[in-house]
Amino acid sequence: MNITYDETQKAMNASIEKAKELNIPVSIAVVDTGGHLMNLARLDSVHGVLDFAVRKAKTAIMFGVDSDVMGSIIAGAGLHSYGMLNANGGLLTIAGGIVIKNNKGKIIGAIGSSGGTPEQDKEIAEAGVKALS
């Protein structure tokens, strides 16, 4: 099962509210289980972070773990990181990409935020996930 548009909008609204609360101009992206973009917002952020938000969400959905967890896996395994990071159109393995699960624990999508610090991006994305809990 994939995330629905209404669910992406609910997650997006919560993430936008968190970004405004933190006063951080971010870009936020929500993807379905295939990594296809379902919803996107750019809150007066610079152009470059738009792509980062999408890449963080895609990294989370492709591997079924948050983007920062994937970064730890790559770093901890001593893998050749260039190949891993440039796979699948380019991954972004820093905090801010979070998997979204339904009430049965099945992954239905992912959300990515970029424009703040990695910790702020993660907090903003987590707000969107929590809105669906």
Image (cartoon, rainbow, N blue to C red):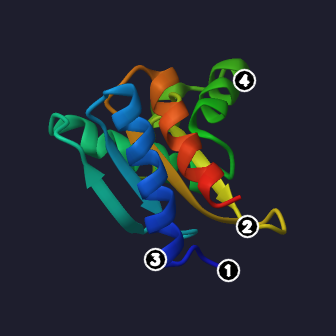
Nearer the N terminus, badge 4 or badge 2? Answer: 4
- The residue nearer to you, when weighing 92 against 49, is 49
How far apart are the two marked residues, 4 and 2, measured between alpha carbons?
Answer: 30 Å
Q: Are marks 4 and 1 in contact (CB under 8 Å)?
A: no
The numbered mark, 4 or 1, whose residue comes first in the sequence reads: 1
Q: Amino acid at mark 1?
A: Met
Reading the image, the residue beneath label 4 is 77
Amino acid bearing label 4: Ala
Would you say 99 lies left or right of 52 here? Answer: right
CA–CA distance in space, label 1 to label 3: 13 Å
Q: Is residue 91 left or right of residue 41?
A: right
Can residue 85 be seen here? Answer: yes
Badge number at residue 5 = 3
* 114 shown above or below 109: above
Q: Kindly identify the amino acid type of the residue bearing the numbered disc 3.
A: Tyr
Q: CA distance from mark 4 to mark 3?
A: 36 Å
Q: Secondary structure at mark 1?
A: loop
In front: label 1 or label 3: 3
Mark before the other along the chain sequence, 4 or 3: 3
Asked whether, in this view, residue 121 is left or right of residue 132, the answer is left
Tell me where residue 48 sits by quadrant. top left
Q: Secondary structure at mark 2?
A: loop
What amino acid does circle 2 point to?
A: Asn
Residue 4 placement (x, y as % from top left): 53, 78
Do residues under tags 1 and 2 come within 8 Å of each other at their CB atoms?
A: yes
Mark 3 or mark 2: which comes first in sequence?
3
Give the percent coordinates (x, y) of residue 2: 60, 77
Q: Residue at x 43, y 67 (%)?
A: 9
The local secondary structure at tag 3 comes to helix
Residue behind mark 1: 1
Image position, residue 96 (x, y; %): 50, 35
